[in-house]
Amino acid sequence: MTLFLAICLGIGLALAVGLRPFLPALLACALARGDAGIDFEHTNVAFMEKPAFLLALLIGVVVLVAMERRHPPEDVSSGPFGAAVAGIGLALGALLFGGALQDHHYAFGVGLIAGIACAALAEASARGFFSSTRRRLDREAAATLPAYAEVAGLVLAGLSVLAPPVALVALAFLVWLLLQQRRRAGQKYAGLRILR
């Protein structure tokens, strides 16, 4: 695999776990265990293919879903639990990007930094998008938003392994989404200053 494809794969996986950390990571690590488009064997993240790590990711999925069913999603995402989940997403993004590069004999450390950046971008874009969308929906409809984020992360992870350049489209979309959110926030605050 060329450096370009390895970078695209890393970008896609990091963005996917930035959207939702556990299920996309579980898919990527299960594919790596089966050597299906990605393989972490003989890399610094070989442990991610091990059954114990896959089980830990599965437990993470169950705990996150249980918390969101028990509490409103905005409470889960904005509290200490949400901060912990976001931190796990950043760590998984770093490890997956680093592993994707090292799998093809490129620098692991560069992947760690790039993975954190991509996962942080996805988290910020998703948090802003789902927060503003949640305000416009009734409580029942808003409760389904985490499922949409999960599906988006899962699809992105799968497509990134099958066709890595797809990640560049996702990257461009998330950058655009974040810029739109910042522009709207700037207009809102400008409007509030005018009212004073």
Image: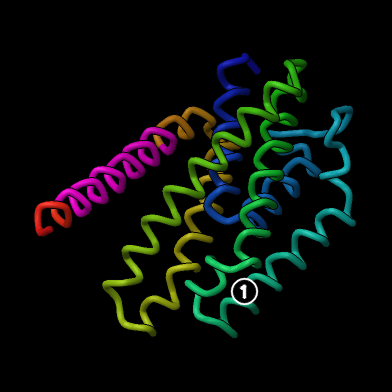
Q: Does the magenta run of residues contain 181? A: yes
Q: Is 136 above or below relative to 23?
A: below
**Residue name at image x 88 percent, y 55 percent:** 51
* Main SS, magenta residues: helix
Residue toward you, 187 or 87: 187
Q: Is 38 above or below relative to 103?
A: below
Q: Tell me which segment is drawn in magenta.
A: 170-190
Secondary structure under the numbered disc 1 in the rendered image: helix
Residue toward you, 146 or 179: 179
In screen coordinates, is 148 left or right of 6?
Answer: left
Question: Residue 172 at x, y = what percent?
Answer: 37, 33
Q: Does the magenta run of residues contain 125? A: no
**Residue name at image x 59 percent, y 31 percent:** 9
Q: Quadrant of residue 48?
A: top right
Residue underneath mark 1: 65
Q: Quadrant of the C terminus?
A: bottom left
Disc 1 residue type (three-letter) = Val
